[in-house]
Image (cartoon, rainbow, N blue to C red):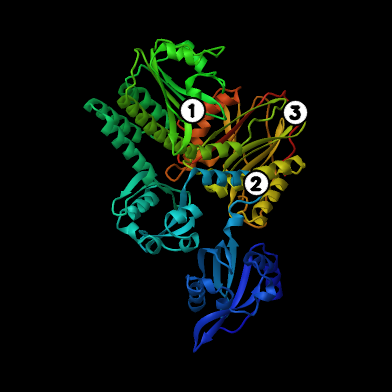
Amino acid sequence: MAPERFPDAQLLQMLDSDPQGWVLARSVRDDGAIVDFTVVYINEAGCRLVGRRRDELVGRRYRELWPETVNDGTLALYRSVVETGNPATRTVYYDRTSISGHFELRAGPYGDGFLVRFVDLRQVTVSPQSAGGARLYDMLDAAFDGFTVLRPIRDAGGEIVDFVCDYVNQLGARLAGRSAEETIGRPLSAISPQSFTDGLFERYRAVADTGQPWREELAYPAIGQVWEVNMGRDSAGSVAISFREITAHITRERELVDSVTRAETSTRRARALESVTTALVAASTSAQVYDVIGSVLQRSAGGTGLALFLWQDDRLELHYHSGYEHEVVARLRNLPADHPYPAVEVARTGIARYLPSVDEFRRCQSAATAPVPPGDRQAWAFLPLAVAGHLLGTLVVGYRDPQDFTEDTRSTLTALAAISAQALQRALLFETTLSIATELQHALLPTRLPTTAGLRCAARYLPWTRGAEVGGDWYDVVSIRDGVVGVVVGDVSGHNTAAAAAMGQVRDALRAYALEGHRPSAIMRLANDLVRNTRLDTIATCCYLELDIARNRGTGVLAGHPPPLLRVGDEVDMLALPADPPLGATRHPRYRDTPFAYPAAATLLLYTDGLVEDRGHPIDLGLDELCAALRTAPAADPGQVLNHILASSVGPQPRRDDIAMLCLVSTAAPSSTELPPME
């Protein structure tokens, strides 16, 4: 048994100042076996996280303080740390009377006991200063029904043998028939053993190993359920999964097909309905749905003109049309919300309308000052697009000949519109999910670059991430004072919400430090302190240049980032800036200011590493390719310079990382001021 120890004053002072929780516990033994632990010390942050005062915790035993968690594996983890002397990490989720939170536990042996640091992941995943990160979480909650993240567990040979649930949202846990507390931190083999027999484990493993996303509707006849599952691999190698039970949707689709099939009196109509259903099931995007509606559905419905309207901000907007004349389309694009055109009423009430003649079409718009012209049509069917009582809009089918609209015809048209609405809703939801990362990424980047006398600027950002992933590449141009600007390009490690949150904070901090008038090296030191002190748990590379346009010179600092390129005439060189440590890599790094000449008509290029390297493309080769492309690029227009580089064979092909690029062309007159000597 190790002798009793207690932290010295210096260690206690450090633990007391830590914003995360720390607990020191001593073993309680019976005949030499550990049966419990007594809390010896807990810092103030730990008291806040568990919601109790220190005098309520110190001196009391684990089983007494948190009885509801005794059998969940955490107590056994602490016992193993003490007995083996090996540190351990675990993620747990509690929603109990004695404790509540989503914690990451990092425990290590200390005397005859353990010292554990615990972090409430709900509070640190996105910091309060990151409105962009919080917005992404809101959008994720809206975009997915159930969502979980599985971390692969590999054997000694590197093969995946199991997964551990690192995260599941509340809805996802309920859909799986468990609570989040019963799911987070536990292996897949314990929470979903059927995954190893129904093929899902192999799917998870394939996605984790290859990085290829997977989407499928899975039917389970034994329990009468159908699930839609989407999988993708994140930058840490874990598998992110969204899932929802769609049994009711599939059942409604089948019931609609059965109902229409029974009502059909001809084999032709039944085949037409089946062909539309098959084509719409295969459609993933709204454009593909519109293609099906314009080809397969229009032919099946027997119409010669189609128009599809969707509600958009309390206004019915035309999203698709086929076979309509130009003057009709122009009028349909400008329909007031109170226009008597039947499509507006149908979208509001959800009740279909059938107009068998031109006279009825004109009569229903008799009060309109600007009625929609009939064009080359004699009859119309106005069909509501509705899913589970929610009205999306109206589908209009026009006919060149008068129609009787029999019960069979109306039943067929109603079913076609219902199936189209369900396919369209799925496609719109899928597109919303895919657009989240791009929208947030651009929201975190400058909307426009400032105008500076004597300087022309252009930037490009090319995302590589997919789905709900977000990259950490950024660029910025800061007007410091007349004729002086700060330019920066950086890359926060990762492609997830934490990377986006950290990128937003680092970018805003660099801008603020620059506006305060700090030298480039001081700006880097302050940014490094921010990354370390706020515990962003990441590192960032960065290139920062301060340009004095009128004096044709600049000062630069590199923080673990590829060097910028300078083109003067036909010569292209890398700026000779010392390679200092990335932001967040060390506690007390040294950053050095390096002056350089920035002559009139010279071109500067800043970029992130995704442009020139990946695991299969050496950076030296990528830099040689980039220098060659810059040497042959147009000289005066920075936008054309970037377009030329992107059109050249520079760097990895195909790309596997985000890219940020910033090009600056000096249009200032030559200065007589000499460059100061190198420090």
| Image quarter of residue 512 | top right
- The kind of residue tagged 1 is Ala
Q: Secondary structure at mark 1?
A: helix
- In this rendering, is residue 525 above or below 554? below
What residue sits right under mark 1 in the picture? 347
Q: Is residue 316 left or right of residue 199?
A: right
- Residue nearest the observer in this picture, 137 or 41: 137
The one nearer the camera, 663 or 442, is: 442
Q: Amino acid at mark 3?
A: Ala
Q: Nearer the viewer, mark 1 or mark 3?
A: 1
Q: Which of the image's four quarters has the C terminus?
A: top right
Q: Secondary structure at mark 2?
A: helix
Q: Which is nearer the eye, 49 or 10?
A: 49
Q: Answer with left or right where residue 247 lies relative to residue 264.
A: right
**CA gap, disc 1 to disc 3?**
62 Å
Estimate the spatial distance between the alpha carbons at disc 2 and disc 3, rounded to whole Å. 31 Å
Residue 185 percent coordinates (x, y): 47, 62
Q: Is residue 309 above or below residue 101?
A: above
> Mark 2 = which residue?
505
Residue found at x 47% / y 47%: 145
Query: Element under label 3?
Result: loop
Mark 3 crowdedness (10 Å alpha carbons): few <14, some 14-19, many ≥20: many
